[in-house]
Amino acid sequence: MAQEKARRADAKVARVPKVPLDGAHHGDIRGAFGTIGEHDPAGARSWRRRLLALAVIIGPGLIVMVGDNDAGGVSTYAAAGQNYGTSLLWTLLLLIPVLIVNQEMVARLGAVSGVGHGRLIFERFGKIWGRFAVSDLFVLNFLTIATEFIGISLGAQYFGVPAWVAVPLAGLVLVGITVTGRFETWERLMFVLLFGNLLCIPLMLLSHPTLGPVVQHFVVPGVEGGFKSDGVLLIVAIVGTTVTPWQLFFQQSNVVDKRITPRWIPYERADTVIGTMVVVMGATAIMVGTAFAFSRTGGGVGNPNAFTNAYDLANSLKAHAGPAVGAIFSILLIDASVVGASAVTLCTSYAFGDTFGIRNSLHRSWREAKSFYATFTAIVTLAAVFVLIPGVPLGLVTTAVQALAGVMLPSACLFLLFLCNDREVLGPWVNRPWFNLLAALILGFLLVLSVSLVVSTILPGIDVARLLVVLVAVMIVGLAVAIVINVRARRAMPPDPRLDEDRETWRMPSLALLNQPGKSRGRLLALCAVRGYAIVAMVSLLVKTIVASHGGH
């Protein structure tokens, strides 16, 4: 028996991983504001040294969050303010724990495993599920990058610059930022662009908001005009533009590329929390600014079809609040689009490298990682060409893509939740029971919003408010059943010595050495159910978009 076990262990060691690790992912942490040695201890530190360490670590969490206030985000928040005033602010408050929990999990996965999100899905769920996850990501990311170029073209149009000039120029800027061959240079250039997000503050202040409606709608859920199909669509779009699948893939791969290890996880958590606060404050400023620009009471225009696209909105802001507000909004839109395009395209290139086994690190030069940078350049080029096709309904495409992200997010979150309970991958870093409960609540919340959109699309006359009540009740029952099953499963599991090991030094062994996950009917059923639902939801969303493009409701 002992000889057989040894033979199997030797076979695992000899097995060549399907996707080789990139050696550039190991070494000193090089950030925009300094360097931390590979073996620099993270133990007892003065507050000054902790702040300096945070300054070096900060980046993946902040960039992924601010990058999410992209063209789709700016347009969606502005549409919410213009169409529904400040009545949808409560959705942003609820999204704070959603963002922190989801992104903390992927940051932890990246630091402990040392491999990208796409690769982990392939290795722990198999080729079929890996292809599903990555193909969804590629399609959604391409459409998302297209919306970034739509934002650039609409913002430039306000200043009289034609799309055929603005879009190619932005593409050159994106490629130039990325192919430097130095991670820290890329991060510094990204931070320069991130400062453009601060334009949302004067945008809000120049609209002269009053505090009362803002506070009220932050704490009292509701939708101006009632929970109707169009309002629910916009709520799902807000969720889809604030919490997106590409964020999960990007931050994990960026944490790996920055060489962050488990002992720096507390700093990366702080990075994620800071980024969350920044993105929510930015979204709030845009929504409040547009709401009060059209109505000093914060009530919006009260017309669910008022928003067409960001260019028309900028001109409306100019007419209602002055030329400065229209210009600020347009510059904010361009800057946000460039940041978003850079992050989403890089995410796609990371995932492409994970899937096809190519070097995928910003530490490498063009000569060392030609396929990685060529993929980035090709995606930018194709998305730019798509946007320049005459007759594309730009505003509608932007809003529809954000809703599509909201529909596809639950399946991405389910993969994430399973990975963060995989003891082979995370060892002592697996989710605690209370954290699993919180993550399950978030997954249920996302499913409730998504299902309400699908049902209201198929049955436009349904009472969406009552539907939400029913769905929440079903979610609570489902969570209760899941908790009981989970508690019983945990009690039946033998003690795992890895859970007691030192968390700072524990890292996932080579993928070739990991035991494959045991077959679980419950896991398979959950994955199939969410996948089947995603297909139905995407078809219904396509129908909704086509109807809206022909002037329907």
Image (cartoon, rainbow, N blue to C red):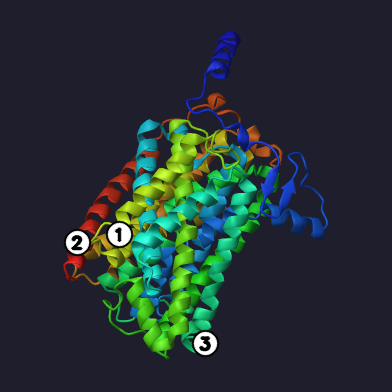
In the rendered image, residue 348, in percent from the top left (x then y), is placed at 44, 45
Question: Pointer 1: what residue?
Answer: 451
Apparent side of residue 447 relative to residue 48 in the rendered image (left or right): left
**Residue type at tag 3:** Leu
Tell me what residue is drawn at x 24 percent, y 72 percent: 463
Q: Quadrant of residue 546?
A: bottom left
Q: Secondary structure at mark 1?
A: helix
Camera-nearest residue between 490 and 214: 214
Spatial distance from mark 2 to mark 3, Cα to Cα? 39 Å
Question: Pointer 2: what residue?
Answer: 546
Camera-nearest residue between 12 and 475: 12
Question: Pointer 3: what residue?
Answer: 211
Residue 6 seen in this snapshot: yes
Q: Secondary structure at mark 2?
A: helix
Tell me what residue is drawn at x 50 percent, y 45 percent: 487
In the rendered image, residue 312, in percent from the top left (x then y), is placed at 32, 76
Camera-nearest residue between 143 and 331: 331
In the rendered image, residue 307, in percent from the top left (x then y), is placed at 31, 75
Q: Secondary structure at mark 3?
A: helix
Location of the N terminus (image quadrant) = top right
Give the label, 2 or 3, closer to the camera.
2
**Residue type at tag 2:** Ile
Which is nearer the N-term, disc 3 or disc 1? 3
